[in-house]
Image (cartoon, rainbow, N blue to C red):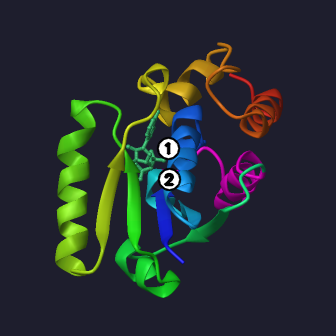
């Protein structure tokens, strides 16, 4: 059983994230989307909300599940017996940070392999930060996020508008 972990903050999950998860699901027997607590980042959605959104967004993918995690990624990889960490690369600008992260993780645990995957070209401009900014300013993000995320954003912004 080959297992891949897709870690991230997913605050919120975008169609770019989902595209990468789908690609990984075709290569591995099982994919775990690992939703990081990311408390220091002061997330827009709580961990429980993000986890639920990811769960609903991947519900149609039989070999994909979502879990929350905190602490060191390499430790979590070891606990889950995963064979690879999948990270998405949108542009060259992502590369430097992702390269550092992959090498640091390898330094912490030689067994951990990082695999980079590119999303569909039309998703390369999507970022969680931009989605939040556009939605908060009243822009339509329907085509950028999975339906469960759209619903959650609409609910949140209805309760807490500008
Ligand atoms: P983190 O806080 O760990 O950066 P993110 O949720 O922002 O978490 O990103 C998780 C992973 O998804 C990262 O590897 C990031 O490069 C990748 N990613 C983010 N947006 C996209 C996108 N539009 N297409 C493909 N990969 C993406």
Q: Which residue is located at x 51 percent, y 46 percent?
A: 23
Q: Quadrant of the C terminus?
A: top right
| Crowding at mark 2 (Cα within 10 Å: few <14, some 14-19, many 20+) | many
Compared with residue 50, is residue 95 higher up or lower down, i.e. above or below? above
Under circle 1, the secondary element is helix
Query: How far is the residue under mark 2 from the one under mark 1?
Result: 6 Å
Compared with residue 31, is residue 58 higher up or lower down, i.e. above or below? above
Query: Would you say the magenta stretch is mainly helix, strand or loop?
Result: helix
Under circle 2, the secondary element is helix
Residue 139: quarter of image:
top right
Can you tell me whether the CB of the residue at mark 1 lies under 8 Å from the nearest atom of ligand 1? yes
Can you tell me whether the CB of the residue at mark 2 lies under 8 Å from the nearest atom of ligand 1? no
Q: Please tell me which residue lies in front, 73 or 1.
A: 1
Position of 98 compared to 51: left or right? left
Q: Is residue 150 magenta?
A: no
- The image position of residue 21, as x and y in percent, is 55, 49
Circle 1 residue: 20
Q: Which residues are magenta?
A: 42-59
Q: Which residue is located at x 41 percent, y 26 percent?
A: 124
- The image position of residue 130, as x and y in percent, is 49, 26
Q: Is there CB contact under 8 Å for labels 2 and 1? A: yes
Residue 40: quarter of image:
bottom left
Circle 2 residue: 24
């Amino acid at each position: 059983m080959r297992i891949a972990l897709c870690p991230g903050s997913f605050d919120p999950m975008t169609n770019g994230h989902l595209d990468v998860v789908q690609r990984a699901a075709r290569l591995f027997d099982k994919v775990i989307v690992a939703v990081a607590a990311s408390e220091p980042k002061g997330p827009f959605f709580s961990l429980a909300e993000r986890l639920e959104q990811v769960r609903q967004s991947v519900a149609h993918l039989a070999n994909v599940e979502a879990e929350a995690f905190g602490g060191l990624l390499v430790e979590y990889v070891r606990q889950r017996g995963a064979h690879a960490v999948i990270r998405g690369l949108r542009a060259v600008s992502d590369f430097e940070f992702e390269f550092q992260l992959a090498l640091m993780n390898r330094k912490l645990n030689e067994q951990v392999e990082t695999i980079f995957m590119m999303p569909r070209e039309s998703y390369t401009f999507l970022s969680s930060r931009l989605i939040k900014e556009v939605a908060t300013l009243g822009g339509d993000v329907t085509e950028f996020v999975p339906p469960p995320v759209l619903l959650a954003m609409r609910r949140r912004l209805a309760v807490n508008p500008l």
